[in-house]
Image (cartoon, helix red, strand yellow):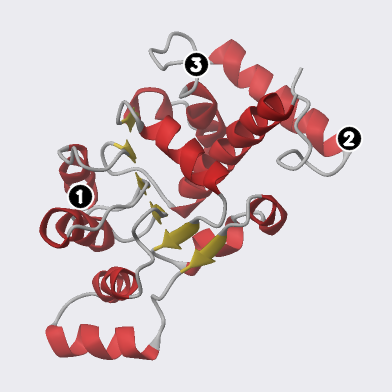
């Protein structure tokens, strides 16, 4: 039985609903090839959207889950997001337990002005600002909205030596979304979790991070036992 405290729903009724939902997903999902440490991430993503297609569309770098857990348990790890929705969606109490902080720069005045001046997107400039501030190295980067942000992250990794602990690349859309995620899967230097194809969204990034936080609490309890 899951005896997590920090990463569980705050009421017994809420916990029961969530656990029942996970049980239904396990019963209905059918066959999958995910490793035991990967499946809780995919299951929570299915739970967030009631979409069983994420069984199969979700792809993991072999070291992704381990890298994410190590980053969370290291404490004071930054979460850099492409949009505010991810920062708002993440549980403040769960992040605080691990000393984590969120950052997003998409609406900063300097980001907007630089995007206009260079003819790029705000998302590109937001990722560059995060890199200039030294926030990307060792961070969990969550991209749920802007394919150009994910493409820029790949460039920063390859050309400027950025080294996030983990990239969760799940931008949704019809222009460059699928292509940006395929590009991320070609990166060997940094672990990643992606959703192949057009599907994605900030809700799924939040779900994936919440799943990792839950797994991190399980490991933390085991280490303290």
Q: CA distance from mark 3 to mark 2?
A: 26 Å
| Mark 2 burial class by Cα count in 10 Å: few <14, some 14-19, many 20+ | few
Q: Residue 73 in the image: state x and y as whole percent.
A: 56, 42
Q: x%, y% of residue 140? A: 42, 51
**Residue at (78, 31) in percent of width and height:** 17
Q: Are marks 3 and 2 in contact (CB under 8 Å)?
A: no
Q: CA distance from mark 3 to mark 1?
A: 27 Å
Disc 2: which residue: 12
* Relative horizontal placement of residue 14, taking residue 140 as reference (left or right): right
The residue singled out by tag 3 in the image is 36
Nearest the viewer among 193 and 99 is 99
Cα distance in 3D space between marks 1 and 2: 41 Å
Report the residue marked by disc 1. 180
Residue at (46, 48) in percent of width and height: 205
Secondary element under disc 1, as helix, strand or loop, is helix
In the picture, the quarter occupied by the C terminus is top right
Dot 3 falls on a residue whose secondary structure is loop
Foreground of the two, 147 or 95: 95
Q: Secondary structure at mark 2?
A: helix
Depth check, mark 3 against mark 2: the one in front is 3
Work out whether 165 lies above or below 1.
below
**Disc 3 versus disc 1: nearer the observer:** 3
Residue 103 screen position, x and y as percent = 48, 68
Q: Position of residue 132 (x, y in %)?
A: 29, 75
Q: Which mark sits nearer the N-terminus, 1 or 2?
A: 2
Q: Residue shown at 48%/59% (left/top)?
A: 78
Whether 31 is drawn above or below 175: the answer is above
* Contact check, label 3 and label 1, Cβ < 8 Å: no
Q: Give the farthest residue toward the left.
A: 159
């Amino acid at each position: 039985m899951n005896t997590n405290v920090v990463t569980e729903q705050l009421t017994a009724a809420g916990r029961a609903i969530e656990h029942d939902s996970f049980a239904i997903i396990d019963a209905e999902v059918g066959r999958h090839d995910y490793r035991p440490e990967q499946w809780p991430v995919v299951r929570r993503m299915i739970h967030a959207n009631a979409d069983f297609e994420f069984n199969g569309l979700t792809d993991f770098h072999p070291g992704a889950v381990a890298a994410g857990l190590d980053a969370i348990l290291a404490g004071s790890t930054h979460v850099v997001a492409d949009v505010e929705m991810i920062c708002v969606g993440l549980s403040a109490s769960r992040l605080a337990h691990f000393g984590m902080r969120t950052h997003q720069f998409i609406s900063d005045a300097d980001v907007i002005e630089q995007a206009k001046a260079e003819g790029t997107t705000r998302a590109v400039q937001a990722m560059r600002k995060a890199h200039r501030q030294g926030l990307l190295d060792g961070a969990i980067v969550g991209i749920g909205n802007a394919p150009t942000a994910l493409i820029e992250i790949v460039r920063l990794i390859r050309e400027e030596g950025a080294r996030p602990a983990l990239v969760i690349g799940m931008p949704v859309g019809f222009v460059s979304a699928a292509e940006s995620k395929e590009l991320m899967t070609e990166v060997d230097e940094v672990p990643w979790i992606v959703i192949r194809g057009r599907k994605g969204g900030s809700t799924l990034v939040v779900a994936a991070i919440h799943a990792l936080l839950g797994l991190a609490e399980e490991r933390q309890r085991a280490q303290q036992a």
